[in-house]
Image (cartoon, grey):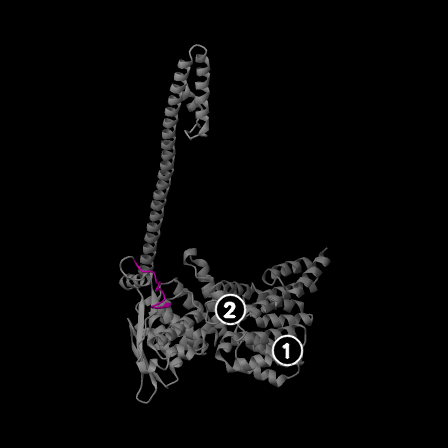
Amino acid sequence: MADDLIGSLQGGEGEPQEEGVESQVGEAVAAAFAVDQSKHDPEVARAAVDFLKAQTQEIEEQRAFRLSRIRGQSREGKLRRFGLRMRNGLQVFTALVATVIGLGVLVMLWDAFTSRSVVVDAFKAPPGLASRGLSGDVVAKGMLDALQKMQEATRSVDKGLNTRGAWASDIKVEAPGTGVSIGEIDRMLHERFGHDLHIDGELIQTDTGGLALTVRGEGVPAATFEGGSGDLGKLTVQAAEYVYGRSQPHRYAAYLENENRFADAVAFLQSAYPHANNDEERARLAIDWGNAYAVLLQPARAAEKYRLVMTLAKPRSANWWRAWGDLVGSVGLTDEEGAWREGHALLQAAAAVPKREQPQLRTVFVNPAVITFDPPLELTSFLQDAKLNGGAGAMVFTDAPTIGDVYAWMHDPANAARYIAAGDPDDPLTKAEVLLLQGYAALDRGDAQGAVAPLEAFYRAWTATPSVQYAFLNQPCFLGLAYGLAGRLNEAEAVFKRVGVQSLCYAFHGDVLVHAGDTAGAERVWAEGLKVGPDLPPIPLHRGLWELGHGDLKAAEADVSAASSKAPHWADPLKAWGDVLAREGRWGEALAKYDEALKYAPAWAELKQARAEAVRHRS
């Protein structure tokens, strides 16, 4: 009975209860029994009480023993459960660490197998130079800095090889039990499985007290560069350029052209081309070669290199199309009509092939678009190219100046200014375009005298800088126009003569003569221009505008419609055609021409005003 009471008072989980409860119950039972027995026999009662006390003491001793065992088992269970959790946690942690290490090894192996870097190892230098701060590490770091600067300055489609110092991956975490750092393991994997080009060398002092820096590497024959005692920086750049040219010839040629060092590019390509490994590499170098000749205004040599590419490259391959597009530009330096026909042939060929064989918009269509007077196509091509290299593009020149000029031709001065503001202010083409935009704006508002100063400054840069001359082939014609409209005819004639056979100059020359009252002279100049370039649209456009001003609507419509047929995506002939139709009262037809023109010059304010007038009259 006492045991049942004790069991009923313990917790459901067997946890010990208050110690005084069981003792109180036993004493109560003994007292009750003793009172009952004392009524019959006191001795029996005393004996019974003594017996019950002994039994209660035994029960309490057993209870204490059981409670101690319960408490011990509870502590052991808790400790056992804690140990199990710790062991499981350690197993999971060990598995995670092993996984991370395994992934790290796989990453290091993959990086090693795919590594194609130019690695600059430590150079050697005698203690005497090291004491002057010219240690081998200093030379190697200078070489690395020079290579990285050239890499960053190169605007090309391909990324080229990375450049890094041999110590770049030296992470100071030692592999267990080996004393080898993870960086050293990484280097060993790169040396065993990678395709890195290691560059090293030495710096010595010459007998005359100067410096001689030697560099070498796999596939890079040793070369020594000498200079004065303070010329380490110059020697380092020369050595870095040598390494860059031998290891990445195409990118080095692009770098030289990006830096406006076109004569240096020609000299380098003459020596690099014979060392090319295959026809694809030869084709790329020949394109660079042709570009350098073109900017140096040697169109015959440029065309020769582009035609060479078209024999090396597979027809309708990327290099084949690009060479054809560049050929159009080189022909245009001396033969605008021939370039117009070549450009049309390229555009027709590109439209006829399956989509998978079509050329890249950004590299092929620029020159055909320029020569066929297709500003929207030219703009689209440059905008595509401007997605590369942080907006600078991957062509010979940065894109911003030319994009600004195309927007100006599309009568969108706001976008023109926006792109020029985003360009490199030190770029010669950017400086030239800023002046052009000022001249365009003055002519648009009828201020010929105000256009002269900025256009004169542009013309000085144009005559002095071959790259500006190549990029802006006919823009000096605007100076001739400004001179003529300002009454400075002799200066205008000199500009037109200097620029040469350009359809825009023929068109402006006629405008100047008409403005001076020499109609016969204007007719003679326009006729001469059409004889040289019968397919070029500026001359019939400007003659048609003069005819419109003098009321010869039939002749005007014939001329402006001819100009539009030669350049269907140029908004100016379309607007002029709409103006002729409006003068004849054919408002519906005029509106159609204005709407078509707006597709190609959507921001042209004067065109929008003419359209609004046509809508008002038609209704």
**In this picture, which residue range is highlighted in magenta?**
163-175
Position of residue 595 measured from the top left corner of the image (x, y, whole percent): 63, 59
> Alpha-carbon neighbours of circle 2 within 10 Å: few (<14), some, or many (≥20)?
many
- Seen in the image, is 50 located left or right of residue 544? left
Residue topped by disc 1: 451
Q: Is residue 222 above or below residue 412?
A: below
Is disc 2 placed on a helix, strand or loop? helix
Is disc 1 placed on a helix, strand or loop? helix
Residue 548 occupies quadrant: bottom right
Q: Mark 1 or mark 2: which is in front?
A: 2
**Residue found at the very far bottom of the displayed protein:** 208
**Residue found at the very far top of the displayed protein:** 40
Instruction: Tell which of 69 and 333 is nearer to you.
Output: 69
Q: Are marks 1 and 2 in contact (CB under 8 Å)?
A: no
Q: Label 1, label 2: how many angstroms apart (C-alpha)?
A: 25 Å
Magenta-colored stretch includes residue 173: yes
Disc marking residue 258 = none
Instruction: Tell which of 587 and 274 is nearer to you.
Output: 274
- Seen in the image, is 430 located left or right of residue 293? right
Residue 353 occupies quadrant: bottom left
Instruction: Tell which of 63 and 446 is nearer to you.
Output: 63
Residue topped by disc 2: 399
- Seen in the image, is 311 located left or right of residue 397? left
Q: Check disc 2 and give the amino acid type.
A: Asp
